[in-house]
Image (cartoon, rainbow, N blue to C red):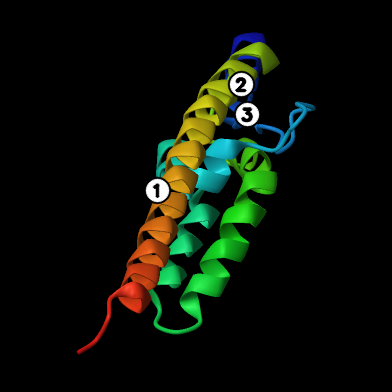
Amino acid sequence: MENETSVSEQNTQMQVPVQVEANRGYTTKFNWGGLSLTFMMGIGNRAYLTLLILIGMVPFAGWAFAIFWMIWSGFHVEEWVLANPQNQYRDEAEFRNIMDSWKRAGFVAFIIEASVLVLYLLFFIFIGIAGLLVPTY
């Protein structure tokens, strides 16, 4: 009888799923990857709320939501990554290491995006000025 009890106790212990805490006590920070690489970071880290950035493809008002959502994701993406129980990290150092790599990549992407935007604006400003300076006959 004692043997049956120990076997049933072992079975009940094995069937209990391990619950992962949503926050895990890790510190979360602003992440440039969430701002600049919103779509890719969401897929890569299973933070699927970031996929709402696709609403930005809606004509007229979509771009305003996309800008808002990029900024919002930058502040909250690390919390969303931790909230997904499929993401398993050994400790905070491993989590911070992964998030820091996304932060560096996102910052580089932000610098490239900002540079392209400035060059684009300068190009069209100079084209506009050149169009005004050309005499019309």
Density class for disc 1 (Cα within 10 Å; few <14, some 14-19, many ≥20) is: few
Query: Mark 3 = which residue?
Result: 18
Q: Left or right: where does residue 8 sit relative to residue 58?
A: right
Q: Quadrant of residue 54?
A: bottom left
- For residue 37, say whether it is visible: no
The residue at 58%/22% (across/down) is 100
Report if the CB atoms under discs 1 and 2 are less than 8 Å apart.
no
In the rendering, at what x and y percent does residue 94 appear? 59, 14
**Farthest residue toward the left?**
137
In the rendering, at what x and y percent does residue 134 appear? 28, 75
Q: CA distance from mark 2 to mark 3?
A: 19 Å
In the rendering, at what x and y percent does residue 62 appear? 48, 76
Q: Could you tell me the amino acid type at mark 2?
A: Phe
Q: Looking at the image, is 71 positioned above or below residue 85?
A: below
Q: CA distance from mark 3 to mark 1?
A: 47 Å
Q: Looking at the image, is 9 positioned above or below residue 120?
A: above
Query: Mark 2 = which residue?
Result: 95
Query: Mark 1 = which residue?
Result: 116
Return the disc, 2 or 3, that comes first in the chain's sequence. Answer: 3
